[in-house]
Amino acid sequence: METAPVTYPLASSSWDEDEIAALQRVIADGRFTMGEQVRDFERRFADYFGSRHALMVSSGSMANLVGVAALFFRSNRPLQRGDEVIVPAVSWATTYYPLQQYGLRLRFVDVDLHTLNMDVTQLEAALSPRTRMVVAVSILGNPAALAELRDFCDRHDLILFEDNCESMGARLDGRYAGSWGDIGTFSTFFSHHISTMEGGVLVTDDDELYQLACCLRAHGWTRDLPPDSGLYQRRSADFFEAYRFILPGFNARPLELSGAVGIEQLKKLDQLIAARRRNAAHFTGLFRDDARLLIQREHGESSWFAFTLLLHPGLADARGRVMAALKAAGIEFRIVTGGCFTRHDVIRYFDYDTVGDLPNANLVHDQGFFVGNHPRDLRRELDLLRRTIDGCLGPDATGGEGWSWTR
């Protein structure tokens, strides 16, 4: 069956003339590497999310890498190779890569089938004497059980690292996702809640972690650190001090163009999320209590990155048939985040184990997919999605006997 022209894409631009004008101002100014536009965006971002510090980098993936690296160089109980980290089994690849690259051992925990976030009832089973950190991931706009995760880490003296790259603007108990951890990370990639083309942000309330991240972002040098930084002792104002390297860092710097666009996008974040939430109300109205499939249950206040659907295992070859029908209708779709990460070839490079057999993560991998959400009215596209699934599976189909979504 041939793929039809796209009628319902996965992603679309959230820009208008404001972002184009911001780019033109930077072009006219002539400074393209990070400068005042990036610093202004960082100040505004920190204020918006209620964090003491925000650091812009070149991607959400780099925010994770810089954040993990900073934890290895802090003065009080730094992470060390061989330490264990509890992680959810479903997330994007670059949630896990920095952990592997710094020699940490991963313990994968299954996800809750309804929220798609880490099943916090398994935290105690995942804990060992080697555990030093938990990575909380809020999947596709839906806040994880952040209060429980924060409490667990506090009780066991663990670091809480919050990968919030898919869930900017989501809230739980009135507090923004991304601000619950010792470090939180965000993405500003094209398809995300705000877009700076490429980009990411790290937030923290810890002064030392912020300074370490500043240093690591740009070559591990001292140039971006305040004169009174506790990371090093300034020797003199001589020629070499401007190029003094103290940490094995990266080049994760963002562009001024991205900072300028970020300022304009952040102004619109509330309205962009409001539009996504209106679409979510229509989506849930169409598919709530549908015996053929399971949709993501909102926890707290989701910012609805996308719309997930898990097809009932009792429907023979359901996903293959649905995908063919979606292609024919011009509806784009993809795997839920990265699926169950232990199912990917790259896992052979990891030191890891799992808490149980990860049945829910495997079900997400085998039976799940998502369609896009956008900051505009999607009622027509969502109605097309419903008609397409009905036409493929039948509106009255059920999953048959002997299997329940209650897991």
Image: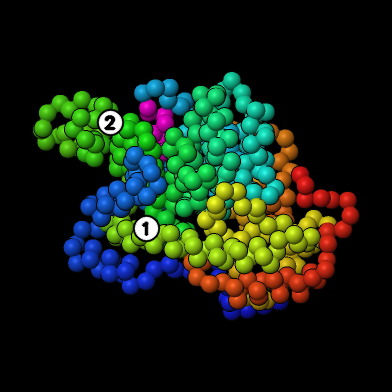
Q: Callout 1: helix, strand or loop?
A: helix
Camera-side residue of 24 and 62: 24
Badge 2 amino acid: Ile
**Residues at marks 2 and 1 touching, judged by CB atoms closer than 8 Å:** no
Badge 1 amino acid: Leu
Whole-percent x, y for residue 162 in the image: 49, 40
Whole-percent x, y for residue 14 in the image: 43, 67
Label tally: 2
Disc 1 marks which residue?
266
Task: Give the left or right position of residue 312, taking residue 237 as reference.
Answer: right
- Magenta-colored span: 67-74
Disc 2 marks which residue?
246
Magenta stretch: dominant secondary structure: helix
Q: Callout 2: helix, strand or loop?
A: loop
Q: Quadrant of residue 136?
A: top right
Residue 71 covered by magenta stretch: yes
Q: Quadrant of residue 262?
A: bottom left
Camera-side residue of 290 and 16: 290
The residue that appears at 36% across and 33% down in the rendered structure is 206
Q: Is residue 319 above or below residue 100?
A: below
Q: Residue furthest right?
A: 401
